[in-house]
Amino acid sequence: MSTTMTHEAAHHEEHPTGLKRWLFTTNHKDIGTLYLWFSFTMFIIGGIFALVIRAELFEPGMQIVQPNFFNMMTTLHGLVMVFGAIMPGFVGLANWQVPLMIGAPDMALPRMNNWSFWILPFAGIMLLAPMFMGGNFASGQGPNFGWTFYEPLSGQYQHLAYFVFAIHLLGFSSIMGAINIIATILNMRAPGMTLMKMPLFVWTWLITAFLLIAVMPVLAGCVTMMLTDKYFGTSFFNAAGGGDPVLFQHVFWFFGHPEVYIMILPAFGVVSQIIPTFARKKLFGYSSMVYATASIAFLSFIVWAHHMFTVGMPVAGELYFMYATVLIAVPTGVKVFNWVATMWRGSMTFETPMLWALAFVILFTIGGFSGLMLGVAPADIQYQDTYFVVAHFHYVLVTGALFGIIAAVYYWLPKWTGNMYSEKLGKWHFWLSVISVNVTFFPMHFTGLAGMPRRYADYPVMFTDFNQISSVGAFFFGFSQLLFLFLVIKTIRGGQKATAQVWEGADGLEWTIPSPAPYHSFATAPEVK
Amino acid sequence: MQNEVTPEQKRRARRTAYWLIAIAVGLYGGYIIYTAVTK
């Protein structure tokens, strides 16, 4: 018996080694790992762009880069972080965790999974390559029109075809990833795992995947129209030919607003896994969490024009988009209430994943509140395109989405590697990050309310103090992430062995298999009662 | 023994994927055509 078991265990670990393993892998764990490392690499690249921005803004006047290079940095920072760091980060988590959490042996379409990932590095290269074209690096040859690539400015960009192709590839990869996740969740669940028994992380990803399939084609259509406008004589967005630049903004934000939720819903899922574990209680209001997620996803389709209140739309339009926008606070409030209620009278402990999850709840809520302020049309006319907006979406995307990814990595790292990370280093990473992120972004509320516009390389002297505080915070935050890299590598290389359950309060199928998770998991399909 | 995916599961997964691909492609073309005729 034991011989058979050993033989089987050995069979489970069989896989190619070296470069071939990573190039040709169809294993969800390998692909998840690839996604997560790609995401971290892009996070570092996007972070360097951010530090160039913050270094230039440390003092008024131009010191370090040329204005066009600054524009390129703001553009590429946004694009790299959204499409290169946050989205692949969550897809990596989904690849690792969804099959483990629903008791499936792998993703439903493993070869397509490999393809989805391997498109990404090439898309990233396509996006960044124009930076190095034209022989004058310092003048900024890359995309320089803001991450929202509004027409007609973006239409004048000389390497537009590169940009369009990169976005198409990124969208293609995301759609295939989403198809795989839906096909897996709908068809590969273990016996007894009904939809309403699925862990919240799986639920949020199922809904996110539907959002992706609905809106990535909009983005693809949008950039296709840009391409035909520039190279094939159409006039979708060209006023001279009868087109409309404002139409571009409608099409873009019809993609762009659901995109915001694509980046945050999986983080909601992560937090909904972590809080019950460390509060040692079941999640409060499971079904209301599912319905709230679905409601947020639905509402995300009908609020897009709150990003463009200043284009001059009819008052009725402004009122509609304002009310629809503030309505999103209701299901979001349900979620925050449920997380707090889960902790209420729980036997809480504060290991590193829990600290990140708690920081998420508090800081994301701050970002949510500033979002409500921006959603109020008459007020938004004051805030539009100021640093207040920058503060808002960084609270949502850094202390929201990114903190969600980091929390997830701490939470599941022992399961992935078989080793416990160092709590001491984890807590150092947490406290350095959470302090510095607030030092960076909180003052931006004030610079914004005082009227400093976003995306400018220079500013009046009156904004200097707050900008210097933001820049100091940004450098601390950036370098704190190197501690995270060190911690992850240290954990992969060794450490105290993790048990199968890892956390005392952990509940779910992924905690029933050994740590590290075997290369092929669930030798027999688990029964879910 | 590894928990193999059954042929039925494979068939259902493929069918789901084909539907979703059709929806994505339809939306892509649909958005462009809609924009072209309404602009």
Image (cartoon, coloured by chain):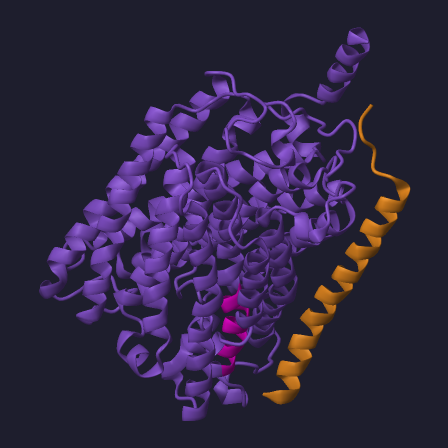
Chain colours: A purple, B orange
**Range shown magenta:** A247-258
Tell whether A293 sits left or right of A178.
left
Q: Position of residue A274 (x, y in %)?
A: 48, 41
Q: Where is residue A42 in the image (x, y as percent from the top left)?
A: 46, 44
Considering the whole magenta stretch, tell me its main secondary structure: helix
**Image quadrant in which the N terminus of chain A is located:** top right
Judging depth in this view, the residue of A31 and A3 nearest the camera is A3
Which of the 4 image quadrants contains residue A150?
bottom left
Is A155 above or below relative to A410?
below
Q: Position of residue A520 (x, y in %)?
A: 72, 27
Residue placed furthest toward the right:
B7
| Whether residue A121 can be seen here | yes
Judging depth in this view, the residue of B14 and A71 nearest the camera is B14
Q: Where is residue A116 in the image (x, y as percent from the top left)?
A: 66, 47
Residue placed furthest toward the top:
A3
Is A34 above or below relative to A245?
above
Judging depth in this view, the residue of A233 and A462 nearest the camera is A462
Which residue is drawn at the image coordinates 44% and 81% (left, top)? A323
Which residue is drawn at the image coordinates 49% and 75% (left, top)? A304
Which of the 4 image quadrants contains residue A148?
bottom left
Would you say residue A76 sits in the magenta stretch? no
**Image quadrant in which the C terminus of chain A is located:** top right
Tell whether A220 sits left or right of A477.
right
